[in-house]
Amino acid sequence: MSPICAKQKFQNTSAAIPRSVSFLILSLVANLFASAPAQCQVSTETPGIETLNQRKHATPAQSQSNRSDLIVSPQPSRVYNLATCFSIADQNNLDLFVAKHNLSIAKAGIKIAGAIPNPQLQVQTGFGDSFEYAFTGQTQQAFLTEQIQTAGKRSKKISVARSNYTLSELQLDALRFDIHNRVRRAYAELAASEANSELIERQRDLAVKMLDLAKQKAKSENDSDVLQSILNVDQFEPQRNQAQGRLQQASANLSLALGVKPEHVEIFDVDDNGLFGDSTKSSRLVPAPQRNLPSVENLISTAFGARLDLKMAEERTEMNRRSLKLTRAERIPDLTLGSGFTFSTFAKNQPAGLGSASNYLGEGAFVTISTEAPVFYQHQGEIKQAISAVRQSDLQVDLLKSQIASGIISDYNALKGAQANLAVLREQLLPVAKRIASVSLDGYVKGDVDLSTAMVEQQVYQQTMSSYFDTVVAYQTAWADLERDVGVPLQN
C-alpha cells in the first residue's frame, strides 16, 4: 500500500485502520510464512546456529545480542566535520602537491624567459716554433661576442611565460575546488550511510518490541504471531550487514578524497547528518530545502565569471595569441655583436735584411656584426601552427560555455525536482506514515489490530523513510552537481 493511500485511510477513521484489499494480500503472504514453521526450523545439531525454538524463548535483548556476532561493526575511530575535512585535503592530497610543483616550474619559466644571453669569450693564441720563431710574425687575438634579441623577443617570451604561470595558478585553484567538491560528496555519502544504519537499527528495535508483545500475547510456543515476528526481526540482519559495508566503503572513499592512506578497515563519524535528522534547517552540507533558488540566468552568468576551467580556457587563448606574436617576431633575425683585441709576435732575432721588430708590434682592436640571412625560410610553418592554435582555443571557449549552460539547466531541474519531493515527503507523507504506524502498534497492543496489519503499517513507514533518505541523497547530489557547474560554493 502506498503512503498516500495510507494517509487517506487514516483520515477516514481515527479509532482503527480498516483492512483494504492490499492489506489482506500482504497479510495472507505473512500468514503463509507463519503457517510453515517446520520449514523455518534449523537442526539443533548444527553448531554455531541457534534454533527457531531458542529464538521463541529468548528475550528481545537476548535476541538482539545473539545476532550481533554476524555483523562486523567496528566503532567509529574518528569524528570529522566538513571544515576539518577541507583542511586535511589541502594538506595531504597528492594531486595538490603535484599542482603546486607545476606552479614552481611555471614561475621558473618566467625567470628563464627574461634571461639575457651571456657573452661568449674567445682567445686565439698558441705555443711552439710558429709563435716564437716566425720571422713574419703570428697574429693572436681575444674577443667577446653577444647575441642581441631583436623585435622585442625577450619581452614577448616573458609575456608568454607569465601567461603560463597564470594558467598554472588557475589549474591549482580548479583542482582545489574539485577536491573540495569530492570531499563534500564523500562526506555527504558517509552522513547518508550513518543515517541509514541508524534507521535500520531503530526499525529493528521496533520489530524486537513487536516480538516481545507477540510473546506476551502468545498462547503456545508455536503461535503464528511469534513465528512471524521472529522472521520480521531476522529480515533486518542482511540490512545491517549491508549498512555496515556501506559505512566502511564510505569511510574508505572519504580517506581517498582526503589523501589519507587507509591502513585497516575503519569507520569514520560525522558531526553533521544534514537533512537526515528531523531538522529542516540549513546544514554545512546543503542549504535548507525551502530555500528559494536563484534564476537559471543568474547561475549561468555567475558561472561564466567564476568557472575556473573557463578562465583557464580563456587564459590559454591569450597565451596562444602571445605565442603567435612571438612566432611572428622570430622572422626578424637576431644580431650577434663582437669586439676584440689583436696583436702579433715575431722571432726574437731577425735575419739580415729584416728590421728588428717588437714582439707585440701590430696591436689593434676590431668589431664584428653577424646575423642570419632569412633567404629560404621565414618561420611560415610555426606561424600557421600558432594561428590554428588561436582559432582552436577560441572555439574551445565557446564549446565550454555551451556545456556549462547545458549542465546548469540539467542540474537545476534535478534540484527543483528533489526539492519538491522533499517537501511532499517531509510535510505530507512522513507525518501520516508515522502516525499510521503508531496507531497500528497501539491497536495491536490493545487487540484491535492483528499482527499482520501492524507489520504492514510498519513496513509502509519504513518504505516511506527509505524513500525520504533516497530523496535527501538525490538533493545533496544535485546541489554538489550544481555547485560544480557554477564554479562557486552555493551553501552560504
Image (tube, rainbow, N blue to C red):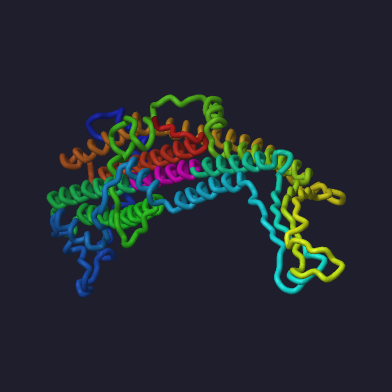
Q: Residue at x 35, y 30 (%)?
A: 428
Q: Residue at x 59, y 43 (%)?
A: 164
Magenta segment boundaries in residue numbering: 173-192
Q: Is residue 273 shown above or below 98?
A: above
Front residue of 44 and 451: 44
Q: Is residue 35 left or right of residue 101?
A: left
Front residue of 465 and 9: 465
**Image coords of residue 242 (percent x, y):** 34, 56
Q: Residue at x 56, y 27 (%)?
A: 301
| Residue 235 visible in the displayed image | no
Quarter where residue 256 is shown: bottom left
Quarter where residue 326 is shown: top right
**Image coords of residue 12 (percent x, y):** 30, 28
Number of numbered discs overlaid on the protein picture? 0
User: Is residue 50 found inside the magenta-colored segment of the image?
Assistant: no
Front residue of 44 and 259: 259
**Image coords of residue 376 (percent x, y):** 86, 51
Q: Is residue 127 shown above or below 488?
A: below
Front residue of 484 and 415: 484
Q: Is residue 195 shown above or below 349?
A: above
Magenta stretch prevailing secondary structure = helix
Q: Is residue 338 left or right of residue 215?
A: right
Q: Is residue 49 left or right of residue 283?
A: left
Q: Is residue 435 left or right of residue 297?
A: left
User: Is residue 184 found inside the magenta-colored segment of the image?
Assistant: yes
**Which of the image's four quarters has the N terminus?**
top left
**Which of the image's four quarters has the C terminus?**
top left
| Residue 328 visible in the displayed image | yes
**Image coords of residue 57 (percent x, y):** 13, 59
